[in-house]
Amino acid sequence: MKVALDTNRYVDLMRGDAEVRALVEGARKVLVPFVVVAELRAGFAVGVRGRANERFLQRFLGTAGVEVVYATDATTHHYAALFRQLRQQGTPVPTNDLWIAALVTEHGARLCTRDAHFGKLAQLDLV
């Protein structure tokens, strides 16, 4: 199984959440959307433990089976389709989360998140 981590679930993992740890350990591959990395680093930049948090992030990203995924031309097509769907439904989601959804859709991963608004996209497999 391929799992993609949302920002809030990465934070949960770093705080020792057993459920997220088991999911990550059981995954064939763990994807971290570039947007999640950016959101984490933004938090590090304004937090008091920025350097330590960056070291933890670097260690995690260097783990076998963990991969940062970046937007490609194909991703922009997924983004556009999801944007249209949400607009037609009248249920927008934050822009960063739309990028995450597009990457998860493109890579055929399950999304590990606590954000309920991802449920507005029935094609996402949420854990």
Image (cartoon, rainbow, N blue to C red):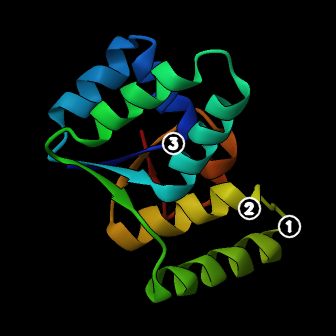
Q: Are marks 2 and 1 in contact (CB under 8 Å)?
A: no
Residue 60 in the image: state x and y as whole percent: 30, 33
Cα–Cα gap, marks 3 and 1:
23 Å
Q: At 51% from the left edge and 42% from the top edge, which residue is drawn?
A: 6
Do the residues bearing badges 3 and 1 touch, measured as CB atoms within 8 Å? no
Q: Which residue in the structure is indicated by mark 3?
A: 6
Work out whether 26 lies above or below 86: above
For disc 1, the marked residue is 90
Question: Residue 46, located in which quarter of the rendered image?
Answer: top right
- Observer-side mark, 2 or 1, equals 2
Q: Amino acid at mark 2?
A: Thr
**Residue most extreme to the front:** 51
Quadrant assignment, res 57: top left
Answer whether labels 2 and 3 touch (C-beta < 8 Å). no
Q: Nearer the viewer, residue 57 or 112?
A: 57
Task: Write down the residue under mark 2.
Answer: 95
Q: Residue at x 27, y 30 (%)?
A: 23
At which x and y percent is residue 71? 49, 74
Q: Is residue 80 above or below residue 64?
A: below
Left or right of 13 in this view: 75: right
Callout 3: 10 Å neighbours few (<14), some, many (20+)? many
Depicted 9 relative to depicted 94: above or below: above
* Residue at the image position 80 percent from the left and 62 percent from the top: 92
Q: Secondary structure at mark 1?
A: loop
Q: How packed is label 1: few (under 14 Cα within 10 Å), some, or many (20 or more)?
A: few
SS for callout 3: loop
Give the Cα separation between the discs numbered 2 and 3: 14 Å
Counting residues from the start of the chain, the first of labels 3 and 1 encountered is 3
